[in-house]
Image (cartoon, rainbow, N blue to C red):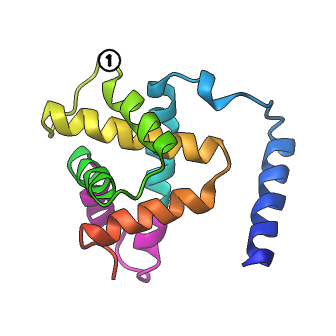
């Protein structure tokens, strides 16, 4: 595991240096900005998992990913993580900031409650990603997928 952590840290440093990213206090980002990046990071994790099942038609991979990258699935994941008390107090606070954020958009195929809950989950994903807590991010997403029956 130590070798893996070192490679993650090395990649993170490479990523920041190459893209000339400045240091920013993640707590200064709005919850909707955290959800913006968190949505993309969560989708990348899901697509990676779907691809890992082996090469298949792209349409089939898209359908599988779309089933997991929607407000309903994301809301169910975060509800299970909260129910099982998997989150730290800081993570719960970040989730709640995202959930309570006032967005001008709404989901096309979700209830308002699911949409707001999913936004909180995405904000948490974005927060963990921007803080460099990739191990915690992947652990929580993995637990959530497992709890909703999507991880063999």
Q: Is residue 69 above or below residue 58?
A: above
The residue located at (84%, 60%) in the rendering is: 10
Q: Which residues are magenta?
A: 46-70
Give the prevailing secondary structure in the magenta stretch: helix
| Residue 101 percent across, percent down from the top left | 36, 22
For residue 54, side relative to residue 8 (left or right): left
Q: Position of residue 132 (x, y in %)?
A: 68, 49
Up the image or down, 145 lies above or below 12; here it is below
Asked if the stretch drawn in magenta spans residue 59, the answer is yes
- Residue 27 at x, y percent in the picture: 60, 27
Q: Taking the image as drawn, is residue 60 in sight?
A: no
Element type at mark 1: loop
Quadrant showing the N terminus: bottom right
In the rendered image, residue 45, in percent from the top left (x then y), is placed at: 48, 61
Residue pointed to by mark 1:
102
- Residue drawn at the location 56% of the way across and 59% of the way down: 136
Q: Quadrant of the C terminus?
A: bottom left
- Front in this rendered view, residue 43 or 103: 103
Q: Is residue 108 magenta?
A: no
Residue 59: image quadrant is bottom left
State the residue in front, 21 or 65.
21
Question: Residue 41, relative to residue 116: is it above or below?
Answer: below
Asked where in the image residue 142 lies, by quadrant, the reply is: bottom left
Q: Does the image show residue 52?
A: yes
Q: Going 49% across and 67% down the picture, which residue do you hit?
A: 48
């Amino acid at each position: 595991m130590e070798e893996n952590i070192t490679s993650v840290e090395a990649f993170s440093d490479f990523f920041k240096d190459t893209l000339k990213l400045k240091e920013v206090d993640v707590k200064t980002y709005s919850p909707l900005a955290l959800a913006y990046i968190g949505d993309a990071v969560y989708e990348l994790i899901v697509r990676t998992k779907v691809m890992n099942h082996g090469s298949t038609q792209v349409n089939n991979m898209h359908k599988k990913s779309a089933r997991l990258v929607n407000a309903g699935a994301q809301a169910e994941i975060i509800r299970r993580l909260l129910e099982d008390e998997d989150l730290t107090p800081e993570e719960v606070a970040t989730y709640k900031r995202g959930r309570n954020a006032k967005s001008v958009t709404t989901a096309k195929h979700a209830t308002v409650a699911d949409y707001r809950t999913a936004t909180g989950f995405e904000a948490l994903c974005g927060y963990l990603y921007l803080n460099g807590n990739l191990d915690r991010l992947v652990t929580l997403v993995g637990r959530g997928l497992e709890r909703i029956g999507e991880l063999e």
